[in-house]
Every structure is written in structure tokens, then in C-alpha cells.
Image (cartoon, rainbow, N blue to C red):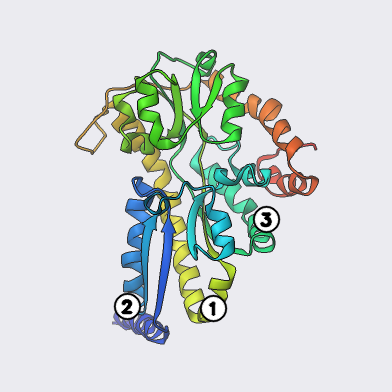
Amino acid sequence: MKLLTFTTALLVAGSALAQDLPKTELQIIGGLSNLTAYQQFEQPFWTKTIPEKSGGKVTATIKGFNEMGLKGPELLRLMSQGVVPFGTATLSYFASDNPINEAIDLPGLAPDVETARRVTEAFQPVYEKFYGEGSKVKLLGISTYPAQVIFCNADIKSLGDLKGKKVRTSSRTQAEFVEAFGGTSVTMAFGEVVPALQNSVVDCAITGSLSGYSAKWYEVSTHLLALPINWNQQIHAVNQATWDKLDPKVQTFLQDNMKILMDDIWKAAAAQTQAGYDCNTGADACTQPVKGKMTLVVPSAEDKALLNATLKDKILPKWAARCSADCVQSFNDTIGKSLALTVSK
């Protein structure tokens, strides 16, 4: 009886909170609309979860940035200007603006999703300050895609086999990773990769294991190296002036629920990474109706050690050289302490 009373009290409290919220309409520019992060998490969060939890008081419309004719790298500028009120974008899109945007996702930094999240949370306060002061953008959360791995339309058995290969990369640090192993980095948009693999414009390409499956890379690739290179984290943010105009109750409501959304995406990342491995290679564990026939290349202990050594000897020094002294110090004080790494400027 006490449990029933307590539960009823919670429902009444939640209902009262929803009634206290003023009518608010939001416009969201989300991530890539053809990927599971958008379809399974972002879109239902804004169009179903938020309206339901607010009792219909807070509603939102959302479209992927690709549906709006945007390419991604311009999103931070558009949010800063207030042209885009709420937006989601990949951190690596802004690497050319400032190397600090590469700090949490350097190749080899996080061999598993638990480490990736620990690194992200350690550095998040640095980003909150950086975006708030420099771009007038309020950071609401950082999520992740499944592990970024290597798809090849070529026979590969280890990282060493990247030597001489043309590899599609999506960030400067991925390019440095490929070049460290003797490969040639090729920058191209996600949507151009399938014909590029098909026509041997590139031999390999890096993306999320499940993202590659969703885009049917298994139709134009033969081998999948199941070694997380990086994670391609996403920032979820809002123009500061837009945020300041919201009722404080709405701000609290959104922040509380954004934390839940971030938790849900991070918790799903490991399972989605494995689902990508399973479905691209046609494993029995794949629950999707269409299964690929790729060969799964399981990384050896030597490959894992080699990736870690490459991070320390090549990736980190190059990154530190182009990042400011404050940036490097922030890394050492947060991520460095968490992973027992020290970077020198």
C-alpha cells in the first residue's frame, strides 16, 4: 500500500511539473537522418518523449542537418549566430577551427566504449567553457556513434595491411592514423563512399560499424577490422541567446531529460558496435532481415598494442603541436589523469 502511495505521489508530482511548464515550441537540427542515432534516439526524443513528459506543453520539430541541405561543419557557426537554435553535430567537423575539438577522440585513445565515455565526461567541462565563451553556444550533452572501424574492399588481416592502401577518413586525426601505417588518406563525404569503394577510388573506409551497415557498405566491402579506432562523438547544443529566452522551468526540464538521452545513447553504443559487426558479416546474432557477407577480422594483441603505441608516439605529439598550451594543459589535467597519459607541448 505504501509503495502504491509513493508511486502515485511521483505521478502526481510529475503531472504537476508538466502543468507548470509554459507552452514552448522548439526547432531542432539533428544529426544525419539516415543513421540509427537519429532514427532510434534523437527523433523520438524530441517528437515523442519531450511532448509526453511535458504533458504536451513542450513540443519540437526536428530534421537531420542533411535534410536541410547542410554539410555539418557550418553548424557551430550557425548555432553561434542563432540561425540554428538547437543543433547536433560531430565534433570532428570543427577540428580545422580549433584542435581542441579533437581532444576526446584521438585514434587509439579509447579502445572501448567505457573508456570513450570516461574520456568524454572528463573533458566536457572544458568544452562547456570553450563553446560558451567563444561561440556563445551552450553545450547540453555529448553522445557517441558506435565504434569507428575499418571497412575494406581488399584482403586485410591486420593494421599493417593498411600500408599502400587508399583509405577514406573523416577527420584530420584519422588521416594521421592512416598515414602512420603507410596508407594514403582520402577525404570524402559519407554519401560518396559506396561508389568510391565499388570503383576502387579507395580501398578502405572508416566509419561506425552500424553506420556502415545502415549505408550498405557490406555490399561493396569484403573485410571488416573489428578494432575501434575512435568514436566520432556528437555535441548537442543550443544558441545561448535562445536558451536564455526559455523559461527556467523549461531549461531544467530539458537539461534533466537530455541527461537521460545521453545515457541511453552511450549505453546503446557497445551493443550497436557489436550489431554492426554481426550484421555486416552475417553472424547468427544479427536480428536484421538483411545480412552482409563480409569477413570479420578480429584484432590481435599486437594490433591493439600497435594502435596504443601509435597514439603515444605519433598521434598525440602531432595533436599537441597544433593545439594551444592551455589546450594541452587541459588535456593533461582531465583525460591525461584519467588514462595516465602526459602530453608535452
**Can residue 108 be seen by looking at this rendering?**
no
Chain-order first, disc 3 or disc 1: 3
Lateral position of residue 123 relative to residue 26, left or right: right
* Amino acid, disc 3: Val
Chain-order first, disc 3 or disc 2: 2
The residue at the point 64 percent across, 29 percent down is 311
**317 or 312, nearer to the observer:** 317
Q: Hey, which quadrant is residue 314 in on the image?
A: top right
Residue 52: x and y, percent? 31, 73
What mark, if any, has residue 245 been given in the picture? 1
Give the spatial CA distance, label 2 vs label 1: 20 Å
Q: Secondary structure at mark 1?
A: helix
Q: Comparing marks 3 and 1, which lies closer to the viewer?
A: 1
**290 relative to 83, above or below:** above
**183 relative to 2, above or below:** above
Badge 2: residue crowd in 10 Å (few <14, some 14–19, many ≥20): some
**39 or 33, nearer to the observer:** 33
Q: Quick one: quadrant of the C terminus?
A: top right
**Can residue 140 be seen by looking at this rendering?**
yes
Residue 37: x and y, percent? 38, 49
* Amino acid, disc 2: Gly
Chain-order first, disc 2 or disc 1: 2
The residue at the point 61 percent across, 55 percent down is 124
Question: What residue is disc 3 on?
Answer: 126
Give the spatial CA distance, label 3 vs label 1: 24 Å
* Amino acid, disc 1: Lys
Q: Secondary structure at mark 3?
A: helix
Lateral position of residue 90 relative to residue 131, left or right: left
Question: What residue is disc 2 on?
Answer: 56
Q: Secondary structure at mark 2?
A: loop
What mark, if any, has residue 79 been given in the picture? none
Residue 82: x and y, percent? 54, 66
